[in-house]
Structures are given as structure tokens and as C-alpha cells.
Amino acid sequence: MSEMKKIRMGEASFNYSPETAYEKNGNVYCNTCHEQINGEVVNMMGTWMCFRIQCQCEKEEEKRWKERERVMRVNQLKDTCFTNPKQRNYTLDKCLISNEKTIGVVSNYIKKFDEVRKKNVGLLFFGEVGSGKSYLAAAIANAVMEEYEITCKMRNFSQIINDLQSGGFDLDKNRYIDSLVRTPLLILDDLGIERNTPYALEQVYNIINGRSLQGLPTIITTNLSLEDIKNHTESIELKRIYSRVLEMCIPVLVSGADIREQIHKKKIQESRELLL
Ligand SMILES: [Zn+2]
């Protein structure tokens, strides 16, 4: 690094590096953007001083730093949110669902998330297998993390039950449940549990009920029909879970062509274009 140069500014002096700045008619300018970098001369508790002001290049550099930091924070949020890394890239733009009403609900949910959060509005995505319910839920999580930098978690129901039933002594179950209860936005994927112990269902109920008490929004996806959920009678434990879900979540039908089928077709089409 070359030596700093010093020039007088009225009662004060100003230091700059001749490698990055130059002096002209008593002021100092940036070599690159030619903006003035010396500020006004001010009196600080009896001493005259001249502080450096940011030029265009420095403002842009700062912006780039802030953006890099933001991307890092969002990546950390995504690490916590997803157990399936593919879901990090799911966005509403890339979504293959063409049902305008469904897409409208989802984009409003994202746009008005501050209010959604305040009013504790949840969503229940129902519809056939492969209709894109999990995709939509993951797309909401991605948008909420990117636009609001809010912590989200997306977990599969059977995974939770599996963890709780087979976690052994290593798993602190209360802490596990508590961490799901306290997550600002929780997505519970694939509700529709078949073989479960009353104990596991009790824990699932505790998670959902806990979120209701905390006033935190929950998004749930299920292959069950709305009728199945509304009119379930077989198990008291499930009935209790379902009725809580219906209190907390607005049902949204996700329908249309089989999204996996469409992805498959798109892939084949792309392969064709590549080779033929
Ligand atoms: Zn500059």
C-alpha cells in the first residue's frame, strides 16, 4: 500500500490514498466514480475534523456486502427448514399448477404474510396424490424466508411420528415438540396417518394445539378428502387432530393434472430437444 496523502481543509486536515483518490481545487475525489469523498469540516469538541463520505463505489460495495449477508442468512434458514434439499428451489413462478384460484390464494398468503402471521391464518392443502400440494407449501416457505427472513420448518408427519416413537433416550421429546410448536411458520406435510399409536397421535395433537395456543400459523398438506377430515369417526385421537386443523386452517383444493406426470413429460421434452 502506498503512503497516505494529507491535505488541508480549512482548519482540519484530510487523509486519502493517492491510489484510489485525487485532489482537485481543494477537494478530494474518487478515482473510479469521481465523486467527492471529503465531507464538511466540523468542530468536534474543540477539534476541527473532516470525515470521509461514501462515494458511489463504496455505497455499491456496501450494498453487495449486505446482499451477500442476506443470501447467507436465507441459506441458513433454508438449511433449517427443509429435510429434502430439492425443496429449496421450489417457487411459485416455477410451479406447474395452472388453477388460478389456488395460485391466487398462495400468492396472497405470501404477499400478506405479516397480516397472516398476526391473525394466525393457516392453510390446509388437500387434493389428489401428485397434485403439487407439497410443492406449493415449500414455495410459500421459500418466499417467506426470502422476503421476510422468518424461520420456517417443513416436516413430514410420518417423520415426526417416527422420530417420536423411535427416538429412544437420545431424543428429548419435549424439546423436539417445543421446537415445532415455536417455529414461526410450520409446514406439516402429508397428514393422513394410518397405523399410529395413541401416544404418537397425542404428540401430534400437542404440536398442533400448541401452535394454536401460541397463535402461530401452520400449513398442512394431506391426500385425504375434505369430507374424510370433516367426518372422521374411527379414531378419537384423529378426530381431535382434524377438528383442530379445521379451526386453524383454510382448506384449499389443489387440483389439476398430475404434477409428477407433467414434470416427467417436461423432462422427456427437454431430453428430446437436447438430442434430436
Ligand atoms: Zn467511487
Image: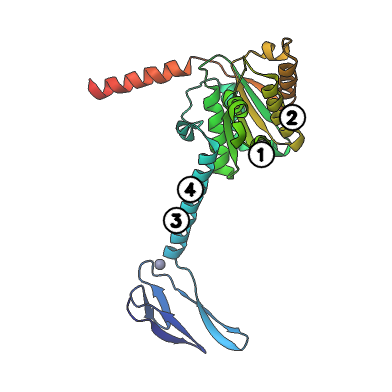
Image location of residue 194, percent across then percent down: 62, 14
On whether ligand 1 comes within 8 Å of the CB at mark 2, the answer is no
The correct choice, above or below, for 275 with respect to 79 in the image is above
Circle 4 residue = 71
Q: Quadrant of the N terminus?
A: bottom left
Q: Say what secondary structure mark 4 lies in.
A: helix
Circle 3 residue = 64
Q: Say what secondary structure mark 2 lies in.
A: helix
| Residue at image location 37% in from the left, 77% down from the top | 17
The correct choice, above or below, for 268 with respect to 218 in the image is above
Q: Which badge, 3 or 2, comes first in the chain's sequence? A: 3
Residue 157 position by quadrant: top right
Q: On residue 79, which mark appears? A: none
Which residue type carries mark 1?
Arg
User: Badge 4, how many Cα within 10 Å: few under 14, some, many 20+?
Assistant: few
User: Real-space Cα distance between discs 4 and 1?
Assistant: 29 Å
Which residue type carries mark 2?
Asn
Q: On residue 175, which mark appears? A: 1
Circle 2 residue = 209
Residue 22 position by quadrant: bottom left
User: Real-space Cα distance between discs 1 and 2?
Assistant: 16 Å
Image location of residue 237, percent across then percent down: 73, 18
User: Badge 2, how many Cα within 10 Å: few under 14, some, many 20+?
Assistant: some
Q: Which badge, 4 or 2, comes first in the chain's sequence? A: 4
